[in-house]
Amino acid sequence: MRKNIRSACLAILLTLAFCGCGRLLFSQTAPEARDFHPQRIGILPVDVGPYEEAGGVVDDIIAGELAQRKWFQSIVAGDAVRRRIENSDETKKAVNDYLAKLKALSYSDPELSGRVGALMQTDALLIARVDYWQYTTDNKDKFAKVGMGIDLVDAKSGKIVWKASHHLMEDYWVMKPELPGVAKKLVAMMIGEMPH
């Protein structure tokens, strides 16, 4: 009898432990997300901070993951976004003003997001930032570490309908894992929790 109780308790604990695995460190969904089903999404240039080598790479990884899931009729990303920004002063100003206000005040301005959405012909904006893109050590353990934050914005209302942040670490002894490979796994985890 005692063995059965111990086995049952152990099974419950293991189930709870495994259910907790794979969850994002932070994920917040607004109530409006329930009725938000965009058909066209624009991925704004990723804020890579001091990790310049992540520039362009993360944009492509996110676009690839979204394309693979086939949730949207159109995805405006990477080179297409860069070309629009380079070729249109209006688009460049709208994107820069929107992102600057979002970063400085944590405020998604509906007028600016609406203008960016109209110029890019998208219903939603995806805004990502790279928090970590490095190899690190802890005592004798070596890790490849990639961390990101992602916001999904309803372009028309400016409402941030979903935001998340997470990081992924892969340990290694001899062969360093490629950081883009770690980023691809991280993006898949994060986008998997995004409402659409």
Image (cartoon, rainbow, N blue to C red):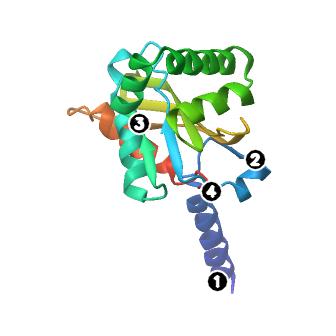
Query: Which residue lies at the image location 67% right of the left edge and 25% below the top edge?
Result: 112
Element type at marker 1? Answer: helix
The numbered disc on residue 125 is none
Q: Which residue is mark 2?
A: 30
Q: Residue 80 in the image: state x and y as whole percent.
A: 37, 32
**Real-space Cα distance between discs 4 and 1?**
48 Å
Query: Which residue lies at the image location 63% right of the left edge and 28% below the top edge?
Result: 115
Tag 4 or tag 2, which sits nearer the N-term? 2
Q: Is residue 50 above or below residue 161?
A: above
Alpha-carbon neighbours of circle 1 within 10 Å: few (<14), some, or many (≥20)?
Answer: few
Tag 3 or tag 2, which sits nearer the N-term? 2
**Real-space Cα distance between discs 2 and 1?**
43 Å
Query: Which residue lies at the image location 49% right of the left edge and 14% below the top edge?
Result: 89
Q: Amino acid at mark 4?
A: His
- For residue 129, say whether it is visible: yes
Element type at marker 2? Answer: loop
Q: Which residue is mark 3?
A: 77
Looking at the rendered image, the disc whose residue lies closer to the viewer, 2 or 1, is 2
Looking at the rendered image, the disc whose residue lies closer to the viewer, 1 or 3, is 3
Q: Amino acid at mark 2?
A: Ala
Q: Which residue is mark 1?
A: 4
